[in-house]
Amino acid sequence: MKKEQLAVYFIAGTPNCRTSIDETLQAAIHGGITMFQFREKGEGALTGETKKHQALRLQSMCKQAGIPFIVNDDIDLAIEIGADGVHIGQEDEPASVVRKKIKGGIVGVSVHTMDEFEKAIIDGADYVGTGPIYSTATKTDARPVAGTTLIAKMKEKYPHFPIVGIGGITIENAVDVMKAGADGVSVITAISHANKPDQAASKLKNVFSKTK
Ligand code: TZP
Ligand code: MG
């Protein structure tokens, strides 16, 4: 993968969207998102065949737009539908195992410490996500707020390794995450709850362009 693809990394599942997830993603694509992760979690989350069909619709939209379609956690689904990659956390299957299963696809790993970061690199991750940078109501089991310090330390040690910040990132604070060294921002609410998701995506893209 190219680092630039992390610039505006939109994450969503059906429970995160105010209108349909299809409409929300289409608007976000129109606004210029560079990557999408299907994260179907929480109350009312789809399962089984319904989840698969939803994934296929979103995957097709991403394909048309030429942006990577990543599946959160569900490695079997990702393989079954031929997603561009998966994103896993520390509680999921080890990245080294997932790396082998997903072959040449993208493997993203959530990390919260320098040790977890270095392990992800060794295990063959293509990028890491770190956070929550700011306080977030979206992930109920999120770790304590980390701020941007860890990103800066990670970039200092591994300047070329792709890193994206996550958690509570908005159009207003995205600039600080980019300035700390992140290659991009991962957001759920900033786009999925925006009155105009296309404008939110395009504003985040502008922050990226002005900072990088
Ligand atoms: N991992 C750490 S924080 C978070 C995830 C999935 C939630 C991010 O959502 P939001 O709405 O952009 O704060
Ligand atoms: Mg997970």
Image (cartoon, rainbow, N blue to C red):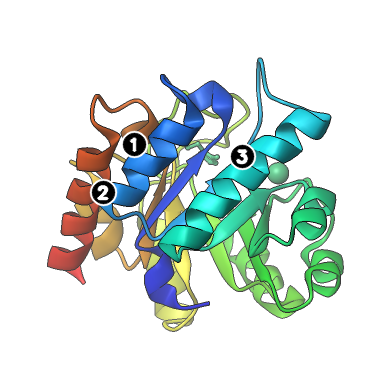
Which kind of residue does numbered mark 1 sit on? Ile
Q: Nearer the viewer, mark 3 or mark 2?
A: 2
The label on residue 191 is 1
Q: CA distance from mark 3 to mark 2?
A: 20 Å
Residue 208: quadrant of the picture: bottom left
- Earlier sequence position, callout 3 versus callout 1: 3
- Earlier sequence position, callout 2 versus callout 1: 2
> At 43% from the left edge and 40% from the top edge, which residue is drawn?
25
Q: In terms of depth relative to the viewer, which is nearer, 50 or 140?
A: 50
> At 44% from the left edge and 45% from the top edge, which residue is drawn?
146
| Mark 2, residue position | 31
Which kind of residue does numbered mark 3 sit on? Arg
Tell me residue 83's x, y (percent): 68, 59
Q: In terms of depth relative to the viewer, which is nearer, 113 or 124?
A: 124
Q: In terms of depth relative to the viewer, which is nearer, 82 or 183?
A: 82
| Mark 3, residue position | 39
